[in-house]
């Protein structure tokens, strides 16, 4: 699905010979992260031998439980092993507290920055029978905005005042803009090859709130627009659109089928993608890939879901699709396509599904049903 973007973003994978054995780091994290990451692992192990891929897995530590045990949420060793020994990785989810815990900071937010994974690519695609017609990709900036977590609290006139910095840089906005336009072109290329889609022509919608935040969101909007205008020969076939984030929420629910590629600063992208999950039936089916120039981490869009953890009913589809996305961005299109189509068949048949989709099956039964379709 993302060949062109993959080519521009994963130079290392393309500049070396195709390895027979890929080393994949597995970071389950907390809660249902521990239940869905084994699903991704089983899917890779079950890939038909025709693809010539073998996998070696490295179990890596991160999360709130890890913090409670060792005092460190993201051990240096995890980052070092990812950088030195892994070809790609899968991340589950973490249970970050909603209150300040001294010394704790979200490990996934830190990991994205430490690994230079500047794009969070989140496809939201309808499968007939589950959800309503939508086929869009949210391309979320992944390293800055309010997620730099530069916050402070102080007192003034006996009142507490808290502040957080929203940082938007030209460099990160340019990179995410370029990624969005390349993905739009690639989706169009796939459509021309006969891929099914609701869209006839490519479009990119830039999300912002520059009617209020004219400096920060203004820089994001202007920089993405400049990327578009800088190369009419390449991007001229793409329709360029802008949407203020609040009315985007309205339009996304009223007329979701009109959106193709949506590019957003970090926080808006995070919120929009959880909202969009409601269009396709469940957060449990929405995948993502954290993508940098030379590394990719597949990660379900959902969190650690403490309300269902330990019950064996977490939907593994988001992680299985994220596993396919990891392979896709590493340049392995064919096994990725095999996984996507097995998942689509499972969803279309709508017999072996977890309770979030109205079914009665367990996580493991869904994994087995998908593998059976390889
Ligand atoms: N990337 C990450 O590691 C993320 C971590 N979180 C963390 O997750 C924790 C819980 O956050 P919530 O706001 O409850 O969001 P959540 O995404 O964990 O859950 C929201 C709702 O969706 C359901 N759900 C999520 N994934 C599902 C799946 N695979 N199958 C079936 N149902 C699923 C849950 O049961 C829950 O009802 C928090 O500590 C938060 O910090 C939240 C988002 C992302
Ligand atoms: O809870 C955490 O530690 C991370 C939450 C970040 C997030 O929601 C996302 O990036 O999808």
Image (cartoon, grey):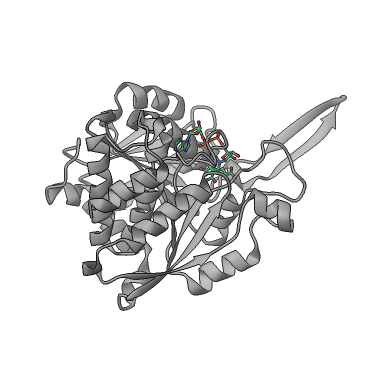
Q: Position of residue 36 (x, y in %)?
A: 46, 48
Q: Is 356 drawn above or below residue 289 in the view shown?
A: above
Q: Is residue 143 left or right of residue 297?
A: right
Where residue 352 sits, quadrant-wise, is top left
Comparing 147 with 214, the one in front is 147
Q: Residue at x 62, y 68 (%)?
A: 77
* Residue 267 to residue 72: above or below: above
Q: Is residue 9 above or below residue 56?
A: above
Q: Is residue 291 left or right of residue 104?
A: left
| Horizontal side, residue 362 vs residue 345: left or right | right
Q: Nearer the viewer, residue 321 or 366?
A: 366
Viewer-proximal residue among 157 and 301: 301
Q: Name the foreground residue: 5 vs 42.
A: 42
Residue at 61% x, 52% y: name it: 107
Q: Position of residue 254 (x, y in %)?
A: 32, 21
Say which quadrant the C terminus sits in.
Answer: bottom left
Residue at coordinates 24% horizontally, 30% vertically from top-left?
129
């Amino acid at each position: 699905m993302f060949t062109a973007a993959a080519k521009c973003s994963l130079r290392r994978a393309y500049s070396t010979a195709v390895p027979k054995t890929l080393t994949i780091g597995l970071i389950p994290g907390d809660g249902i992260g521990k239940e869905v990451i084994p699903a991704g692992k089983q899917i890779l192990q079950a890939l038909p031998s025709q693809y010539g891929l073998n996998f070696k897995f490295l179990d890596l530590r991160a999360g709130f439980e890890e913090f409670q045990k060792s005092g460190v949420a993201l051990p240096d060793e995890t980052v070092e092993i990812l950088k030195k020994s892994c070809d790609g990785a899968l991340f589950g989810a973490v249970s970050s507290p909603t209150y300040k815990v001294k010394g704790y900071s979200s490990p996934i937010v830190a990991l994205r920055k430490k690994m230079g994974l500047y794009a969070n690519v989140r496809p939201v695609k309808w499968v007939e029978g589950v959800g309503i017609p939508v086929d869009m990709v949210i391309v979320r900036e992944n390293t800055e905005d309010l997620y730099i977590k530069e916050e402070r609290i102080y007192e003034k006139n006996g009142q507490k005042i808290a502040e957080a910095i929203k940082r938007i840089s030209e460099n990160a906005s340019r990179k995410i803009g370029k990624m969005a336009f390349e993905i739009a072109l690639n989706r169009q290329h796939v459509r021309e090859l006969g891929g099914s889609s609701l869209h006839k022509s490519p479009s990119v919608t830039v999300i912002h709130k520059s009617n209020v935040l004219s400096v920060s969101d203004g820089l994001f909007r202007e920089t993405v627009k400049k990327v578009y205008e800088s190369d009419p020969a390449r991007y001229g076939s793409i329709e360029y659109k802008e949407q203020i984030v609040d009315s985007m929420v309205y339009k996304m629910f009223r007329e979701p089928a009109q959106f193709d590629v949506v590019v957003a600063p970090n926080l808006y992208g995070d919120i929009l993608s959880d909202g969009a999950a409601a269009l396709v039936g469940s957060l449990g089916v929405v995948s993502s890939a954290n993508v940098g120039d030379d590394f990719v981490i597949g990660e379900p869009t959902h969190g650690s879901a403490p309300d269902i953890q330990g019950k064996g009913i977490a939907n593994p589809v988001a992680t299985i699709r994220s596993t396919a996305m990891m392979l896709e961005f590493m340049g392995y299109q064919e096994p990725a396509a095999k996984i996507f189509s097995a998942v689509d068949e499972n969803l279309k048949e709508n017999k072996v599904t977890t309770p979030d989709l109205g079914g009665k099956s367990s996580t493991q039964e869904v994994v087995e049903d998908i593998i059976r379709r390889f």
